[in-house]
Amino acid sequence: MYQFNFQPVFENLDLLLHGAWLTVKLSFMAMCLGLIVSVFGAVAKTSGIRPLRWLVDIYVEVIRNTPFLVQIFFIFFGLPAAGISMSPNVAALVALVINVGAYGTEIIRAGIESIPRGQIEAGRALSLSPVQILRYVILKPALRNIYPSLTSQFIYLMLTSSVVSVISANDLASAGADLNAKTFASFEIYLVLTILYFLLAFGFSTLFGAIRRAFFTYPAGR
């Protein structure tokens, strides 16, 4: 009979909580930078510049149709052959930004294309600049439409970030692996890790839901 022993986990709970904080920090940074990439990618994809659209299409299709594990291995192990070396944490951040940027591009593109053409024409009739039209006429209404998808993408990104532990980047999964190597309490450690990841995902889902109800429940014409 297996004897459960959670004492090593409780004694090192601060290590796991620090790992959880690093996971949230890494995910937040990757999401913020990835959104910048996504906005530029979506604008390029909806522009009339065909070569630019082709480049974005290639980027999106390559990232969406290859495993994230392969992407992070290529960045961390492959790029040094071309003279580009990164620390594990930097490589993890770059891989996550590139990954979320591709998915975010499609989400934001769909939001932009959901705006009626008449609203854009009205903005031009009011002599708004292209930047003003993008900011006030397109992005603001589009944000309401794509907010659920973006928040779901953040949660997915946070859970996917556990993969970065394979290159020794610092996060919750790597903290659990280090603790397991010291205590060999695999069942107890990974059970606690499962609970922590669930609490993180559920907590952010609840927070994002509250934000949506507070700021994105105005009438469509507002």
Image (spheres, rainbow, N blue to C red):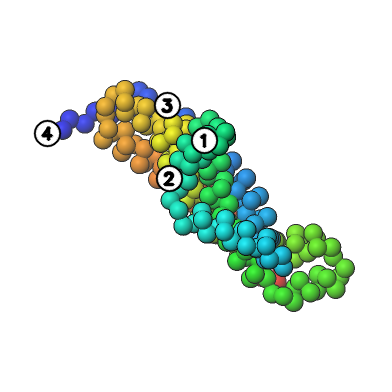
**Quick one: label 3, few (<14), some, or many (20+) residues within 10 Å?**
some
Q: CA distance from mark 3 to mark 1?
A: 34 Å
Residue marked by disc 4 = 1
Q: Quadrant of residue 104?
A: bottom right
Circle 2: residue type: Leu
* Secondary structure of residue under mark 2: helix
Residue marked by disc 3 = 15
- Disc ID at residue 92: none
From this viewpoint, is residue 197 visible? yes
Residue marked by disc 1 = 81
Residue marked by disc 2 = 69
Quarter containing the C terminus: bottom right
Quarter containing the N terminus: top left
| Closer mark to the observer between disc 4 and disc 2 | 2
Q: CA distance from mark 2 to mark 1?
A: 18 Å
Circle 1: residue type: Ala
Between residue 48 and residue 137, name the one nearer to us.
Answer: 48
Q: Are marks 4 and 2 in contact (CB under 8 Å)?
A: no
Q: CA distance from mark 3 to mark 4?
A: 29 Å
Q: Earlier in the sequence, mark 1 or mark 4?
A: 4
* Secondary structure of residue under mark 1: helix
| Closer mark to the observer between disc 3 and disc 1 | 1
* Secondary structure of residue under mark 3: helix
Residue 3 percent across, percent down from the top left:
17, 30
